[in-house]
Amino acid sequence: MIPMKTISTIFLFLLLCRSSSLFGQNIDPAEFSQAFYKTPEKPRWEFAKNNTNEVQLIFSGLFLFYKFAISSQDSNKCSFHPSCSEYGLLAVKKHGTIFGMLATLDRLQRCNGISPELYEVDQQKMVLIDHP
Amino acid sequence: MPNFNLQLKRILLFTASFLLNWLVVAQDLEQTYQTGKANFTLGNYQAAALDLERVIFFGAGKYDAEIFEMLGQIHQIEGDFNRSASCFSQAADFAIIPEDFLRNKIAQASNLIMADKPMLAKIELLGLNDNIPDSFQVKQFFLLGVSEFSAGSFEESRKAFNRAISINNPASAARIDSLFETLKNIKHPNPKTARILSMILPGAGQFYSGDIKNGVNSLLLTGGFITVGFMVAINYSLLDSFVSIIPWIQRYYIGGFKRAGNIAEDRLLQKQDEIYQQILLSFNRL
């Protein structure tokens, strides 16, 4: 039977050996493979996929068509997060067709960058936060 | 009548707490440091960071160099490269042995590159002494090469990579030179040409850059708006067409040629990145 003290001494010794090896930092060139060019992330609109009724399905289809075919060709950037089109779909899903569309019209009126002090700022994307 | 039983209990309780206070000793900084180090070694990084930060806060600088180095490694593992670079910088400041200083400076520069700050990394690397050991010089010039390449200074990058590879493997220097020669010849697609082509014909710049899908999309969208604009002008009036359709044409026409330039830039970067990956493959683990 090996005494407990011997086991703990061996364990501490191994622990110290491992810690000293961690201090010798090596450089793996592969770690810098993304330093020059980062593959841009493709946008995923997960909320456009979970539809519970036909109205949501139609609006999600319109939203995806707008995003792929029209918005992708536009150089302008919405000043809000989520963007106006995303807000529109989320609002319809949350408040229903009529109130959702009214909320979207209200958002489109506000998307002008005149009163940024009224909203919180997303520091990473540098856009104003406004959820439906 | 006094309750002797209760008084006895109180005395016993007081004595016991007094003895416990005397016998039991709270964890001191040395023990906290050892706990943090053990947690770090075992991979319990959050617990280790908590212990080590506590030692820095209450300690008198005894272990600061080692602790900041460990914290730097913890943040690096967690992917917080800015904090990691800052910790390695402090570890270098507290380092006593030149080797520790160099190791931490190299780690700081490496994390600055990972945090998309190649110019700051370059400053740190160029600040190192010229007479440092070869093992550090390889890392210094390799990282300098990476930071220069990331910043788009290809000639400076070539010099740095060449110096790095010449230390251990001089025969491979020619390969680096030939890769940079290939890089020089990569000029297609030119973003400026792509923009001008899309100004002349919407979508043409995208076709030139090899992006057929976006080319067709831009051509159809702008063409569609122009057609609608003409139809409104013929059926209603020029003013109606101008007010209702022209803003849309302007929006997608300008968006189209700006995007053509961006697509060309992206394609060019992808081609240059292929060379960059080959350069990295020329280096073994440093």
Image (cartoon, coloured by chain):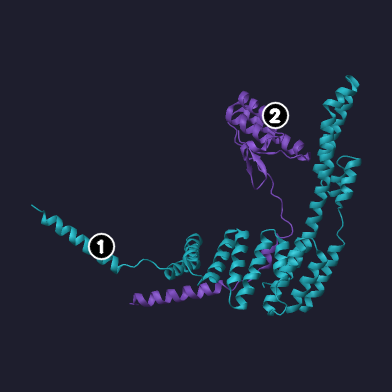
Using the image, tell me which numbered label, if any, was put on residue A109.
Answer: 2
Closer-to-camera residue (B21/A13): B21
- Residue extending furthest front? B1
Q: Quadrant of residue B81?
A: bottom right
Please report the residue visible at 77 percent of the width from the left and 78 percent of the height from the top.
B170
Q: Position of residue B253 (x, y in %)?
A: 85, 37
- Residue extending furthest left? B1
Closer-to-camera residue (B42/B24): B24
Rendered position, B220 above or below A17: above
Q: Mark 1 — residue?
A: B17
Left or right: where does residue B272 sit relative to residue A32? right
Please report the residue visible at 62 percent of the width from the left and 67 percent of the height from the top.
B89
Please report the residue visible at 81 percent of the width from the left and 44 percent of the height from the top.
B259
| Quadrant occupied by the C terminus of chain B | bottom right
Q: Quadrant of residue B12?
A: bottom left
Of helix, strand and loop, which one carries label 2? Answer: helix
